[in-house]
Amino acid sequence: MPLYDFQCSEGTHFEAAFSMAEVPDLAPCPQCGQPARRQMSSARLSIGNSPEYKLIDSTKRSAHEPQLVSGRTGASKKATRYTGNPLHQKLPRP
């Protein structure tokens, strides 16, 4: 879902996610509760290429599952591949 920028009359800026078909012109401010008007904002397009996505994916994966070596087990286990690159979603699965 896309993010939309809003600003209330008190000057509070915040972002909210809505589907493109259901985005309102006004949203309640999370701080003061007053109606906030939707603002024009720039598009958030990704400019990453495949090597950059590979680095981002490996960094995210290693953040909570660091790769540890506990010794030889005899048979190597093939790791499951994960990618967050939207272009890879269209590729056929084995």
Image (cartoon, rainbow, N blue to C red):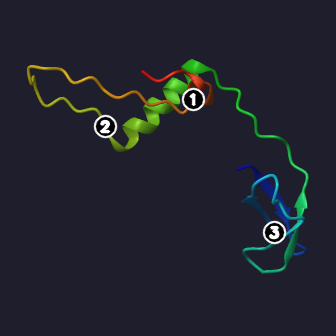
Label placed on residue 66: 2
Disc 3 marks which amino acid?
Answer: Thr
Q: Position of residue 84 (x, y in %)?
A: 54, 33
Residue at image position (80%, 52%) is 20
Label placed on residue 89: 1
Q: Position of residue 14 (x, y in %)?
A: 76, 62
Secondary structure at badge 1 equals: helix
Pointer 1 and pointer 3: residues touching (CB < 8 Å)? no
- For residue 75, what is the image quadrant? top left
Q: How many marks?
A: 3
Q: Nearer the viewer, mark 1 or mark 3?
A: 1
Q: In what quadrant of the picture does the C terminus appear?
A: top left
Q: Nearer the viewer, mark 2 or mark 1?
A: 1
Spatial distance from mark 3 to mark 2, Cα to Cα? 39 Å
Q: Position of residue 11 (x, y in %)?
A: 86, 69
Disc 2 marks which amino acid?
Answer: Pro
The mark that comes first in sequence, 2 or 1, is 2
Residue at image position (35%, 29%) is 80
Q: Position of residue 34 (x, y in %)?
A: 84, 80
Residue at image position (78%, 74%) is 29
Spatial distance from mark 1 to mark 3, Cα to Cα? 37 Å
Spatial distance from mark 2 to mark 1, Cα to Cα? 25 Å
Pointer 3 and pointer 2: residues touching (CB < 8 Å)? no
Q: Which residue is mark 3?
A: 12
Disc 1 marks which amino acid?
Answer: Gln
Label placed on residue 73: none
Mark 3 nearby-residue class (10 Å; few <14, some 14–19, many ≥20) = few
The answer to whether 48 is drawn above or below residue 62 in the figure is above
| Nearer to us in this view, 70 or 85 | 85
The answer to whether 7 is drawn above or below residue 2 in the figure is below
